[in-house]
Image: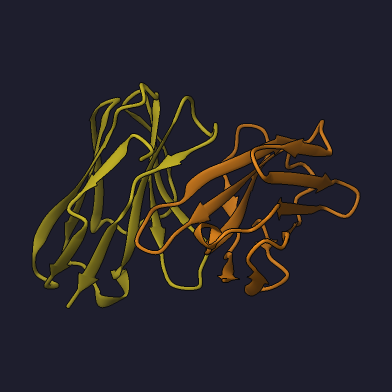
Chain colours: A yellow, B orange
Amino acid sequence: ETGVTQTPRHLVMGMTNKKSLKCEQHLGHNAMYWYKQSAKKPLELMFVYSLEERVENNSVPSRFSPECPNSSHLFLHLHTLQPEDSALYLCASSPGVYYEQYFGPGTRLTVT
Amino acid sequence: GESVGLHLPTLSVQEGDNSIINCAYSNSASDYFIWYKQESGKGPQFIIDIRSNMDKRQGQRVTVLLNKTVKHLSLQIAATQPGDSAVYFCAESDPGNQFYFGTGTSLTVIP
């Protein structure tokens, strides 16, 4: 395992639900990331945090709301999602911003 | 935006043969490259990286080659094993900027 854990591993939610994805890294890294992975598409960077400060927000819709309470934990709060938001959501961490990234196993999200 | 792509979406090799997976990039300022392996149901796993001041770097059964002139990156896997079956994708970045990832090549190892 890479030292990055994500929960839940699978999530099915309706368009009116509110849910949260959790990520925890045990590597002592200073940067954490959320990516979206859709079939046959490259990884899409969503958010970057460095030492709990958000340093990148790649034009992500406001229905996705990140939270980084400390350098080991990262959350992605979800509300009023659309079916096209169904994807694998990957968390990653790195020693510093844009150093080599280590990924968690992902949360497979299905929006119905 | 960045363009990082792979020459072939799928690759099948016999067990024991060597595999070569290719990647092209478009940003001549990119100076750091990583190969990742993603098995079914798992997140991407770091395999090997290389910086632009190098042409070649070797790991355990893997070698990465970088040709900056034609902006081409390759991953060579020696003596491919069934456990090597996965999607492999490259990532590039230029100094201080985010990584851009390719779409991946699916490697199937035939026993």
Give the answer, above or below, for where B10 lies relative to A53.
below
Name the foreground residue: A72 vs B78. Answer: B78
Q: Quadrant of residue B72?
A: bottom right
Q: Is residue B59 above or below residue B86?
A: above
**Residue A10 spot, x, y in % from top left:** 20, 62
Seen from the viewer's position, the closer of residues B17 and A21 is B17
**Quadrant of residue B8 within the rendered picture:** bottom right
Image quarter where the C terminus of chain A lies is bottom left
Relative image position of residue B103 (x, y in whole percent): 57, 65
Residue B9, image x and y in percent?
63, 74
Task: Specify whether B42 is left or right of B70.
Answer: left
Pick the front one: A86 or A102: A102
Q: How many marks?
A: 0
Q: Is any atom of residue A64 visible in this view?
A: yes
User: Is A86 left or right of B76, judged from the image as shown?
Assistant: left
Horizontally, is A32 left or right of B60 in the view?
Answer: left
Q: Nearer the viewer, residue A97 or B18?
A: B18
Residue depicted at x 8% and y 65%: A17
Q: Position of residue B27 (x, y in %)?
A: 75, 50
